[in-house]
Amino acid sequence: MGAITFSCPNCDQPIQCHETYAGKQIQCPSCDEVVTVAAPGAGQSSSRALDASSKLALSSLILSCLSILLGPLGFLPGIICGYLAKERIRRKPELQGLGYARAGLAIGFTFLWLSVAIVIGCLIMHVVNLNSSPQASNRPTASNTVVQSSARSAATGKASATNQGAVLNELQKAEQAVQNQVKLVQATTARFNQAIRNRDTLHVTYKGKALPQATYNVVMQRYKAADDEVANSQAAMNAARNNFEAAFTQYQQLGGKTDYRSQLP
């Protein structure tokens, strides 16, 4: 019959007992904690579980310590690894690494609360600066209240006169723009009408006539040119009418009274 040697999961005290105690609970001679004796023959699987829990616990400690360089990329994974290691050890008390997991959690939560405090402090300082700076710069004093009131009255009168002059100037510009658009609509409409007449005259002249091939080719080119001129002049006329509508709308918004639409062809 052999002996089983293992360490107390609470205080890491080496314990040796007879293998008949495998799977049973005994009391640690060092810390008096009740522990479960590992079963013999579970060497490889126990070793793997032991390694996994120890690696998680050690990773928790290392990542939490590196938080001073990595910030949240350190203490957040460290806290997660620490919780996972503690959960494995809670389910199997014979596993090791509880001390590493506790240390990693303690350091990780310290950096977490410190980061939260820094963020809250920065937000408070930002709000205080936003609230204090405009009030300090804009707060009037008793000595210059009368002067400021007079200055505001004078500025209001000047601003009113300036605004009236600016509105009148804008109205004059808008009316001039409308008049220019009226002329442009008249010109493009005349061009379109002339293109229609030229195309109709060309069709009437050669309709139903037998022409030599050379003459026929020339006439076809003239047909195409006449059709292109009709299309181009119509597009220019439509664009001129759209521009007139936009200019006339702005003219009315500024207070214009003359109905320039009656001058359109």
Image: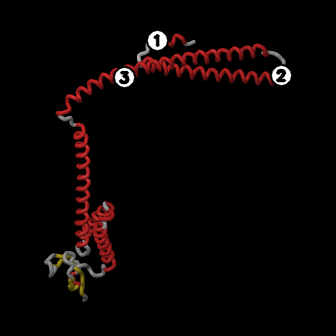
Q: Is residue 262 above or below residue 213?
A: above
- Which mark's residue is nearer the viewer, 1 or 2? 1
Query: Circle 1 sits on which residue?
Result: 258
- Which mark's residue is nearer the viewer, 3 or 2? 3
Q: How far is disc 3 from disc 2 in space, using C-alphas?
A: 69 Å
Q: Are marks 1 and 2 in contact (CB under 8 Å)?
A: no
Q: Is residue 202 above or below residue 131?
A: above
The image's mark for residue 162 is 3
Residue 231, percent from left and from top: 65, 22
Residue 103, percent from left and from top: 23, 69
Q: How far is disc 3 from disc 1 in space, using C-alphas?
A: 25 Å
Q: Amino acid at mark 2?
A: Thr
Q: Amino acid at mark 3?
A: Thr
| Secondary structure of the residue carrying numbered label 3 | helix
**Residue at 21 percent of width and 86 percent of height:** 18
Q: Earlier in the sequence, mark 3 or mark 1?
A: 3
Query: Circle 2 sits on which residue?
Result: 215
**Residue at 25 percent of width and 60 percent of height:** 112
- Which mark's residue is nearer the viewer, 3 or 1? 3
245 left or right of 81 in image? right
| Secondary structure of the residue carrying numbered label 1 | loop
